[in-house]
Amino acid sequence: MKLKHLVSAADLNRAEAIQLMDTAVEMSSVSAREVKKLPALRGKTVVNLFYEDSTRTRVSFEVAEKRLSADVVNVSAKGSSVSKGESLKDTVQTLAAISADIVVMRHSASGAAHTLANSGWFDGSVINAGDGTHEHPTQALLDAITLRDRLISDPLGKDLSGLNVAIVGDIAHSRVARSNLLLLKTLGARVHFIAPPTLLPRALSAQAVSSHHNFDNAIEEQSFDAVMMLRVQSERMQAAFFPSEAEYSKLWGLNRERLSRMNNHTLVMHPGPMNRGLEIDSFCADSENSTILDQVRNGVSARMSVLYHLAGTERNA
Amino acid sequence: MSFTLSDVTLADGRKVNVAIDGDRITSVGTEKHGEIIDCSGLVLLPGFVDLHTHLRQPGFEQSETVLTGSQAAAKGGYTAVHPMANTMPVADNAGVVEQIQRLGEDAGLVEVQPIGAVTVGLEGEQLSEMGSMNESRAKVTIFSDDGKCVSDALVMRRALSYVKTFKGVIAQHAQEPRLTQNAQMNEGQVSAELGLSGWPAVAEESIIARDIMLADLTNSRLHVCHVSTKGSIEQIRLGKSRGVQVTAEVTPHHLLLTDELVRSYDPVYKVNPPLRTQVDVDALREALIDGTIDVIGTDHAPHPDESKDCEWASAAFGMLGLETAASIAQLVLIESGKSNWERLASVLSVVPAQISGLETQGQQIEAGSFANLALIDPKATTTLTDGGASKSSNQPYRNMKLPGRVIHTIFRGKFTVRNGELAGKA
């Protein structure tokens, strides 16, 4: 695989996506060993450059990097010169000067990872760990791995052909939704959107197999293999995207009653962190159908797989 | 200085000799005197007049100064520019506009006619002393809060009404502020995919519709800056058909570039109003040809590298435009085969001079007119590899091959640009 950066889920073709998923399966066996380490990134320096708060994504990357024996440096906006107003360019050039090999970046500006990968400021690899409201490709990869593992028998080497996946909630502001839309389509799945019109840009809904503003009608009309619930941010309410948490929960939240009207096998997914009682109730979050902890586990192996392929090492896993 | 531009082609196609003595044209025809300058193959036009320039002085001299902006203007064939009021301090009083005008005289390359702010500090609340600015040495007639919209309907109504005192005009930056909070690019397919917050066309069109009604109500003059959408053109067309005194401006970049370029996340394409779609570009071109749009204004907006060499959201809005405007006008009006050089002279010189009331600019090329002139080689091409004469380098047309080249610019009878090179102070 000739992959220098992972900035967008669109960077991956079907074969590459399947290879990344298959490698992730191999990587997951490492996590089950007593000594959870591979030497693949020994001697490589990976910088986790986080301009936004993130616990789970940063920890997931850090664990993945350490399991591959990389030297890991964490830079967060609060604990470095970033908060003193240094530009992205200067920060990254500093990292380049200390010979970082891979930068994993989370940034509040859409396109920041793209800019970094194409800027010439840094000649190593760039992994996008979330850029504004644009993309979060490793999240899409871990979601695809979770779907395949739970819904496709004998999954190695296979894609997600024919699966019906609903993405529900704040699609307009979701990098998870954008990356999932791209990767799921690449892998042959059918993506459906469910959201109030204020949170679903027309230009995006045109790219889904179907779009619904009414959750109950969508359940009636479609047969979903998975529903991916997106986190709702309460600041959207102030900007008049929806009237109240209570109304949002009533119309677009996933609850026991709605789940009961879906298939027995329908998976309940959430990228976290959840607002229990808002976009998802506790029954669904904790049900047998929930993959929420699988997603966290698969996040580590998905990121190990990406790091492994980006590092371009020939060593066997 | 006495000289003759020999064998030059006028906008109407006539080939003539144009003799110049002092600051005026003395004859157009066969007569020659003084130095004979061979201008065969060149088109002679009245010097261009830009109604929308950011010269950044005082306050932002790291981006541009009146001198460097004047140099870029001269290189682009301009003999007059109208610097916008969003300087620091804001050009909202007689002292600042007189200072800017004086800096223009010191540079001596183009007529620098300042625009005054509509409201104090561009805050949109209290009218600035527009009467005093008009009576000052700078004789300001155009007022604009450009960069910001005069969004309060009452303030806009009063401003339109008040400037009738001295036949002034309000140049509006049409942008409904609530609909464009934190907007980063045109709202549409591309913004949805890129996850950048959108600047919807309706935020421009709704203000234009309202302002046309207010201009009608007050029987005053409205100039709409940088029209960027198809829907805006429909509003302006309707207003004109009803006899409202409205004029409209388009920038060169909105005639050529689209929001597809934003996929690169290269902040050189970040501009306000944003680059729109091909449908809008086509509609703007048609409107420039059919007269719905009256003038090309560059919205030349220099920014230092540090404001553009960063992630999109942190970058400043604006792009250069003075040195490429004539080429883009030629592309749209001449190369398309849909219009002619007279129309080009009209949108780049004659009509902007009329809107501003600049008596020595945009004149007919005839004996007695002031010698403010631009000479273009329509067969040559222009390819800029950097920011040109501007102090900044936020050049969106880098390495693009554009038609035509400004060969000479003459300001008050003296060369400011000769054979494509700056000739120094006129």
Image (cartoon, rainbow, N blue to C red):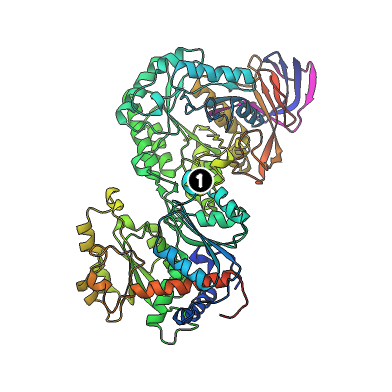
Q: Nearer the viewer, residue A165 or B370?
A: A165
Residue A107 coordinates in the image, percent (x, y): 46, 55
Residue A137: x and y, percent? 47, 65
**Quick one: B380 or A88, which is closer to the camera?**
A88
What residue sits 32% from the left and 57% below the top?
A199
The kind of residue on which mark 1 rests is Val
User: Which class describes the residues within 10 Å of circle 1: few (<14), some (14-19), or many (20+)?
Assistant: many
Q: Name the chain letter of the residue that bears numbered label 1.
A: B
Disc 1 is placed on an element classified as helix
Magenta residues? B27-52
Which residue is label 1 attached to?
A: B281
* Image quarter hosting the C terminus of chain B: top right
Is residue B204 visible in the rendered image? The answer is yes
Q: Quadrant of residue B350?
A: top right
Q: Quadrant of residue B349?
A: top right
Q: Position of residue A229 (x, y in %)?
A: 32, 67
Is residue A180 shown above or below B113?
A: below
Which quarter of the picture shows residue A102? bottom right
Residue sitting farthest toward the front: A35
